[in-house]
Amino acid sequence: MKNTTATFKKAKEEHKKLTMLTAYDYSFAKIMDEAGVDSILVGDSVGMVCLGYEDTLPVTMEDMIHHTAAVSRGAKNALVVADMPFMSYQTSVYDAVTNAGRLIKEGRAQAVKLEGGFEVVEQIKAIVAASIPVVAHIGLTPQSVNAFGGFKVQGKSEAAAQKLLDEARAIEEAGAFAVVLECVPEKLAAKISEAISIPTIGIGAGAGCDGQVLVYQDMLGLFSDFTPKFVKKFANVGEIVREAFEGYIKEVKEGTFPAKEHTYKMDDEILDKLY
């Protein structure tokens, strides 16, 4: 059954946890979809884990549309959410709606996600008014890494915690159907989850959220540049892949691959007639 925004609303009402993973291509999206994940986020994290940037800021609309379209072709049941990249919505409400529309029309996403609190309330309202579902994102917002002075936990002081709680309420009022809480203290995230009627999706925000999201390269051990504290490696696929590559290289150099069973035959009489 296709997951929708209604699925998220019902899960919150029934106290059922939601699952979300990132994906950036058809093959992994299909595997995740078959595994039964509720939602797939085409994150601007593609800039770091796929494109090799040091942060998400260089990612373009064209990058996001390209990867979102690939994921959408692989996801039959999961709700596909596409990140709006840096400067695709901050410049104006008009730009926000136009670019959100491109992710739906060209990328075939079913929802978009944008970072920020009070400063993007008007963008959220306008995008929702254009019949495009919105996931909000507060706490550590990676597109603001320069303003934050690095990737740091948010909401630890009384003032900062109150601001996040107020922003969550404002986002809900603006029409977002869910909100990602990133790198927020566990107790604060639980309080926010109780205070609003839309689902909270945590990443580094504890088990009190209504759902969880992880970058799949992190949870599979495929991205080794750094590992955030909140990541659990559910499998060390990176090591398995490395061993497979080493095995391939070894066999090719030894001449043991390809073997007979990997090759095609032809009639020797035809071969003998060649000159």
Image (cartoon, rainbow, N blue to C red):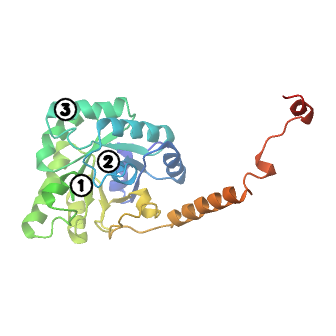
Report the residue at 22% width, 32% height from top: 97
Residue 50 in the image: above or below residue 231: above
Counting residues from the start of the chain, the first of labels 2 and 3 encountered is 2
Q: Element at badge 1?
A: helix
Amino acid on which the number 1 mark rests in the picture? Pro
| The disc label shown at residue 11, or none | none
Image quarter hosting the C terminus: top right
- Give, as a three-letter code, the residue at label 3: Asp
Asked whether the residues under the numbered discs 3 and 1 touch, taking CB atoms below 8 Å apart as contact, a structural biologist would say no
How many numbered discs? 3
Distance Cα–Cα, label 2 vs label 1:
9 Å
Q: Nearer the viewer, residue 19 or 224?
A: 224
Separation of marks 2 and 3 at Cα, in angstroms: 18 Å
| Residue occupied by mark 2 | 44
Q: Horizontally, is 158 left or right of 31 in the view? A: left
Name the residue at the left extreme. 159
> What residue is drawn where x is 41% and y is 54%?
21
Q: In the rendering, at what x and y percent does residue 60 appear?
A: 29, 39
Where residue 186 sits, quadrant-wise, is bottom left
Reading the image, the residue beneath label 1 is 142
Helix, strand or loop under label 3: helix
Residue 95 disc label: 3
